[in-house]
Image (tube, rainbow, N blue to C red):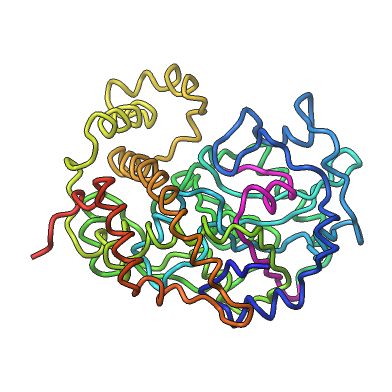
Amino acid sequence: MLVADYARPEVARPALDKFADAEAFKRAGPTPVKRIKPYNGTNLRGLDIVKGPKAIEGLDQYEFLDPYTVRFRGQVLKSGDLFAADLALPSDGGLGTFLTPRSHFTHGALFVVLEVEGKRFPVVLEMHEKGNRIVPLANFLGEHTYYAETYRVANPPADWGRKLSDEVQKMMNGERLSYDFQARDVPVGGILPAEQMCATCTTLPQIILKRTGVEIPLEKSSVIPGAKRNLDYLGMTMVDGVTMPTDVARSGLELVGVFDNRRLKENLSRELTIGHAEATGSAGHGMSHGDLDLLQLPQGHFLMKALELNVAQGRGLVGMLAPLVVPAFGFQVTEIPKSAPPNTVAFYVVSTEIYAPVTTQFASSCTRLTSAIGANEPLALTKLEAEPAISAGVRAQVDAAGISRWYHPRK
């Protein structure tokens, strides 16, 4: 197996040796549901996939070891386990480029076994473009991720599996959370105030954990000082202490599983091109080292997104059209992020749409990199970024997409 977690080989290699079982991959549970995609939403909301007329057959057909524990691909998952993962999206990870320490995961989520009408369904609670949702376990650990690690809470409360099932069902029946561009902490007890009906991929699991009496002191990432000027310009007032997916992996929780879907080429391409403040020439370098100019983005596209979001967020006179316009885009009004101004959300949407073809095109250059990995020689991302041929290739892709023009040199 290829070790996708190239940033921490000292953890990943022993974990793969411990958990990997070639025969286990033949016991993968139900087939993933094709219409449920890694990020784009469907008309399946709330508990639709497990309950009611839209319920999908067969999602309870897993190997259960006890009511809230399953064996999947040879590895044991308990309700309440946390995922730190690389989402299978070529444009994912842009929001982590201006944080330190560098995040080598792009997504976080919570595993839970739901008990619904006498059946048990292993699902994953996550944030996506339409807010909080549940997806089948086979989807999340299949086509939805390049790579994922599982972390377990020590000494959970009694009857925790049932409590988790109850709280997730309550949430999915009545709470529609949008994405939180401020990345605020979850209050003690997990009850969100009216002005904070939103979450990130890493704070969403914390809401459920806190509501079931579990408080985990997770590590936090900090905003790189050079990025604050651009974040202020965007109106993106992130707290200086953000919980990222990588922070789940470095908070002392027990690593209990590794799922590698052999997508290292795509994963590397995204890491190298979207990059980070530390990676000169990458798409993410400018946010911390240049001055953002929104006029340099493709104006027709950007302005249309900004206008759509002004309407969707209910701002000004055009905001009165929100109840009519938002459903036409396949969203509900409550699913539109309001934790940042329209320009901020529009910048995020447009930039990720531009990142996607850049990382996809560069993936072909990563073929020789993955084939050169020796069985006992872990791949070092920083070494790759320092290779002149690699950095030149990244810069060429970023320049060709016009991303470099978004930032003026900082004086």
Q: Position of residue 224 (x, y in %)?
A: 30, 69
| Location of the N terminus (image quadrant) | bottom right
Magenta extent: 132-155
Q: Residue at x 78, y 36 (%)?
A: 50
Q: Position of residue 237 (x, y in %)?
A: 31, 55
Closer to us: 258 or 238: 258
Closer to us: 350 or 209: 350
Q: Is residue 163 magenta?
A: no
Q: Quadrant of residue 48?
A: top right
Image position of 281 (left or right of 149) = left
Image position of 339 (left or right of 119) = left
Asked whether the viewer can see residue 2, the reply is yes
Q: Position of residue 139 (x, y in %)?
A: 70, 46
Image position of 158 (left or right of 304) = right
Q: Position of residue 295 (x, y in %)?
A: 17, 40
Asked whether the viewer can see residue 69, the reply is no
The image shows residue 68, relative to residue 44, as above or below, that is below
Q: Is residue 154 magenta?
A: yes
| Location of the C terminus (image quadrant) | bottom left
Q: Residue at x 62, y 82 (%)?
A: 376
Q: Quadrant of residue 184?
A: bottom left
The image shows residue 211, relative to residue 249, as above or below, that is above
Q: Quadrant of residue 338?
A: top left
Q: Residue at x 40, y 75 (%)?
A: 382
